[in-house]
Amino acid sequence: MAEVHLENVSKTYGKVDAVKNLSIDCQDGEFFVILGPTGAGKTTTLKMISGIEKVSRGSIYIDNKIMNNLSPQERDVAMVFETYALYPHLPVFENIASPLKAPIRRGKFSSKKIRDRIHEVARMLEIEDLLNRMPDQLSGGQRQRVGLGRALVREPAVFLMDEPIAHLDAKLRDFLRPELRRWQKDHGFTIIYTTHDHLEALSMGDRIAILKSGELQQLGSPSEIYNHPVNEFVALNVGFPPMNILQGCFMIKEYKMLIETEAFRVRVNNEVAKKVAKEKESVKVKIGVRAHDVQLSTTKLQPYSSKAEVYVVEPMGLERVVIFKFGEQFFSVLTRDIGLEPGDVVWLETKPEKLHFFDKRTGSRLM
């Protein structure tokens, strides 16, 4: 397997910067996830690593060897596209076998080894009974699995996977996520995997790089990104429900320092206040709190609990997302209390150590 290093990599299409000065390191044997919305630069990044797209600026290294001027065939990478990209004239078996029979690998694999590897991958993807079918006889999800199998059958230096299970049904996605993870760990493969699904990224990645408009926002472990988002964008795009972010300000009441938002008041110590309010302008900040870090009570348990009326209740199996509305701002709380209905009045409580502080102007994390 191999390490992958991107050093100040950019890709420009005319006047559009699709990727801007991107520097990331994917370690040998790592499951590395690139997370971001449509247009973030995820696919473009994979295409530059594979050699399908030329780098406008910067350098790409695989195992400390610069790749910029090498063709895709010379880079020893396997790419799974979001689109199926199957050979329409070949049955499923031959589509999956095609990388092993390519001229560059001619004679490397015996017929038995090719057959064994295809059946191993087909079993994992649950497509063994489709091996004799033609692509036009398959559903979209089945074609996606064949495209995935065509990459998995190889043993390249690096696997590049561009939202490979995005078009599969929910049940199959839930099955394949742990299967891909187990398969990767068992073989020690290096995988760079893109997705727009934060749950997929958190559950699969050893580390996650979050992109927005071609720029790196944060790089870290799933725990680091979830618990310590570096800015408002990351906070809102990782976690379900999205983090509640409200305008807040400091106030003094009865000689105690409080943070007040439309949804709640929380007492904080002076040290917290000093860290956030370094400048006069920063006295007004944005306050973030996860939906599962807010407690609901039918009675007022704390002096600074806030009264609120339930706006909507969304059932989520064992849990409920209880939504409140403050002006134009929605505020979500995740709870197992199944007795709440719209119009009910409850008290909201949260702890200061569960709060996240963001600069109101830049969106950057303050502490």
Image (tube, helix red, strand yellow):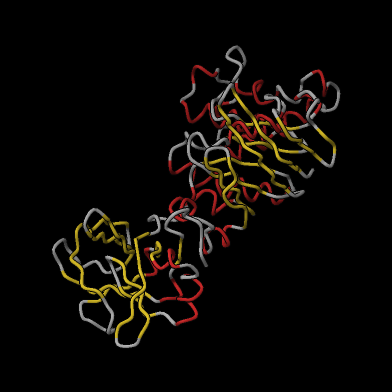
Q: Quadrant of the N terminus?
A: top right
> Would you say 359 lies left or right of 216 here?
left
Tell me residue 260's x, y (percent). Answer: 32, 71
Q: Which residue is at a point 71% across and 40% down the rendered structure image? A: 8
For residue 54, which quarter of the picture?
top right
214 versus 267 height, above or below: above
Tell me residue 102's x, y (percent). Answer: 77, 20
Name, please, the residue furthest toward the top. Answer: 89
Taking depth in this image into account, of 122 and 303 the one nearest to the observer is: 303
Q: Is residue 155 visible?
A: no
All told, the count of numbered labels is 0
137 versus 220 height, above or below: above
> Would you say 74 lies left or right of 201 here?
right
Tell me residue 118's x, y (percent). Answer: 68, 31
Tell me residue 66's x, y (percent). Answer: 82, 34
> Would you say 299 lies left or right of 32 here?
left
> Would you say 12 lies left or right of 110 here?
left
Taking depth in this image into account, of 311 and 176 the one nearest to the observer is: 311
Q: Which residue is at a point 39% across and 76% down the rendered structure image? A: 351
